Amino acid sequence: MRQLLALIILISIAAASSTGTGAGMVRSIWASPTSPYVMFDFTTPMRSTHRCNRSERFSIDLRGMGGRASYETLLMAKAEKLTVSVQGLGTCNIHDAENVKIIEVQ
């Protein structure tokens, strides 16, 4: 019984800790005047996706200062054709895109 409980806990931790990751040049950026989110994807497939990410895109919430700074970084990287690495937060917005935790331009 203890082994079964330990296995269930390990599976739950692994499922909860999976976040999406991706890297590459930014292919497309989606924005809407009625949504606080900006979504984007890469020219290469995502390395891993969170189960809620059915759109295979990442999302930046523009309502905070960090989101606006991340968006400016993303625009600069797209304009300069630079490689971007992203780690997801493990949560998705209403557009089925995973929220960004870390964005890095290389």
Image (cartoon, helix red, strand yellow):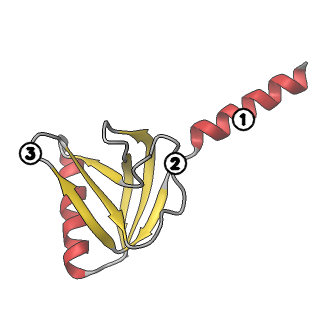
| Labels 2 & 3 near each other (Cβ < 8 A) | no
The local secondary structure at tag 3 comes to loop
Alpha carbon separation for disc pair 2 and 1:
15 Å
Of the numbered discs 1 and 3, the one sitting upstream in the chain is: 1
Residue 43 % position (x, y): 38, 73
Of the numbered discs 2 and 3, the one sitting upstream in the chain is: 2
Q: Is residue 55 above or below residue 74?
A: above
Of the numbered discs 2 and 1, the one sitting upstream in the chain is: 1
The local secondary structure at tag 2 comes to loop
Alpha carbon separation for disc pair 2 and 3:
28 Å
Looking at this view, is 82 or 51 the one in front?
A: 51
Instruction: Report the amino acid beneath label 3.
Output: Pro
For the point 49% across and 52% down, the residue is 20
Q: Which residue is mark 2?
A: 19
Instruction: Report the amino acid beneath label 2.
Output: Thr
For the point 46% across and 63% down, the residue is 22
* Residue 37 position by quadrant: top left
Residue 41 % position (x, y): 34, 62
The local secondary structure at tag 1 comes to helix
Instruction: Report the amino acid beneath label 1.
Output: Ile
Q: Which residue is mark 3?
A: 33
